[in-house]
Amino acid sequence: MSSERRKIPSSSPIGGILRLTNASLARLPAAIRRPCYNRSSVRPGIVHLGVGAFHRAHQAVVIDDLLAAGSAEWGIVGASLRSPDTRDALAPQDCLYALTVRSGTGTEIRVISSLLAMEVGNDDPERLIARMADPATRIVSLTVTEKGYCHTPQTGELDEAHPDIVHDLASPQAPRSAAGFLVEALARRRQAGVPPFTILCCDNLSANGKTVQRIVTRFAALRSEDLGRWIEDEATFPCTMVDRIVPETTDTDRATVSSALGMTDAWPVITEPFTQWIVEDRFACGRPDLSAAGVQLVSDVTPFEHMKLRLLNASHSALAYLGYLAGYETIAATMADPHFAAFAARVMEEAAVTLKMPDGTDLAAYQASLLTRFANPALHHRTWQIAMDGSQKLPQRLLAAMSDRLQLGLPIDTHALAVAGWMRYVTGRDERDREIDVRDPIAGKLAAIAREAGPVAERLAPALLAVESVFGTFGTDPRVAGTVTEAIARLYRLGARQVLAAD
Ligand code: CS2
């Protein structure tokens, strides 16, 4: 679910002279799997906000399978809220793109055709709102990344002072935020007597459906109490757990895929074989037969969500910060260092005691599979990419498990080292004193705190622990302040690799 900001040329051939389009599908090499259904009979039923690589390698693939099985009314209209880059890359190729699955021992390429059209909210908000308000749209799903919800990560509440929220309350018909688009489209449906769509959040937030429900209904109530109540009563916000590792597509990937296709794909996606989607079965106005495509429909997503956020995402972030500091470019390279692989396993062990595993899921096997997935040498998943937006990720990935462990009277050293890694990282200087391009909605604030504190653990740790939107009052616990300070001191003294080697 990374943000993809690079400018992609929309028509220049990369690997061949042809462009991937409906018309050129027949010329693909036989080894490339292609759509086996009639695209022209597919109608849109889902609008998806945030058409990044993750969506295109995960939900869009499930829908592609369902369309192939005959569910013709569930095609996807994709929307980017700001950047036109994905639309500009995909529109000239009829929204087709190649999905490459790399296991480390082999590669499979398949063309996905569930995306029917692309909108850009920023270019034409009215068009996107009209699409969402159309009665044919029965689900609006989202992967807008954690920061796309304009909330306070620590509390999960709408940040009413967020500039986009202030803007959208003043200009509801031309919104910028996801909440602004959702609420304006819902308001129009209400006015027209059309039932609300289901809002399906597919981002790694804690209790994602419930959190987005709180954010959206609060935003709506700020516009009008009646509207807020209608959304609260009539719309549904199922919780979901989504999982697939999808690194940002590189120029090398574009060239490799285009050459395998024998034609240009301006924005292919690359992923791993593993994929998982768990969905709470609460849809306001119908849904596709998701289980036919391997989606697990359950009544409570919480055990799955905690398992994934606290085992996968926690150790991912831990590896990203410490791996980056140690000079490793990718997660696979970090995992190839046994000290780091052992560290990831320790993060998981610390978190495991806070989990109630989903029925039928074996903890040891799940942890082992994560270590294998991280080590996949065919995925170029940059530590820098995962390190992004830490202020939005820490609470649900690391702090929740730390807090549970403290309540159980258990030590928190490994998690504290991961948090210290984040703090060391957001200072903006790496272990060789080179600049780090820190991407975070509060990067400026974090940099100012780090500048003021200087590279002194006893000053840096308390100053960053006082950032309330991330830590709330958690940092005032002396056990937290003590272990985190100690861990930063060790990182400054020894460097990440030596700290892990000594553990
Ligand atoms: C990663 C996730 O970028 C990140 O923060 O931890 O995107 C991770 O790859 C996915 O959640 C895996 O499902």
Image: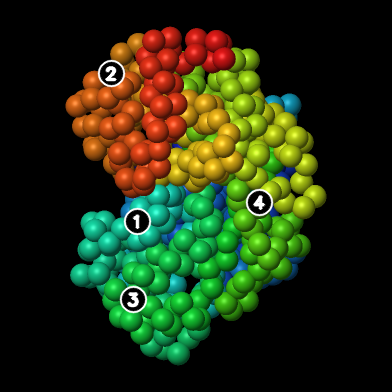
- Whether residue 284 is visible here, answered yes or no, is yes
Residue 126, above or below 476:
below
- What is the distance, in whole Å, between disc 2 and disc 3 at their CAs? 45 Å
Counting residues from the start of the chain, the first of labels 4 and 2 encountered is: 4
Residue 174, above or below 408:
below
The residue pinned by badge 1 equals 150
The residue pinned by badge 4 equals 304
Q: Residue at point 33% right, 21% down?
A: 457
Mark 2–mark 3 CB contact (< 8 Å) = no
Crowding near the residue tagged with mark 3, few <14, some 14–19, many ≥20 C-alpha atoms within 10 Å: some
Q: Amino acid at mark 2?
A: Pro
- Whether residue 101 is visible here, answered yes or no, is no
Q: Which mark is residue 230?
A: none
x and y, in percent, of residue 55 in the image = 54, 51
Q: Residue at point 31% right, 31% down?
A: 462
Does 247 sit left or right of 478 as displayed?
right
The residue pinned by badge 2 equals 455
The residue pinned by badge 3 equals 221
- Of residue 486 and residue 309, the one placed in the foreground of this image is 486
Q: Amino acid at mark 1?
A: Cys
- What is the distance, in whole Å, between disc 2 and disc 1 at their CAs? 31 Å
x and y, in percent, of residue 296 in the image = 72, 58
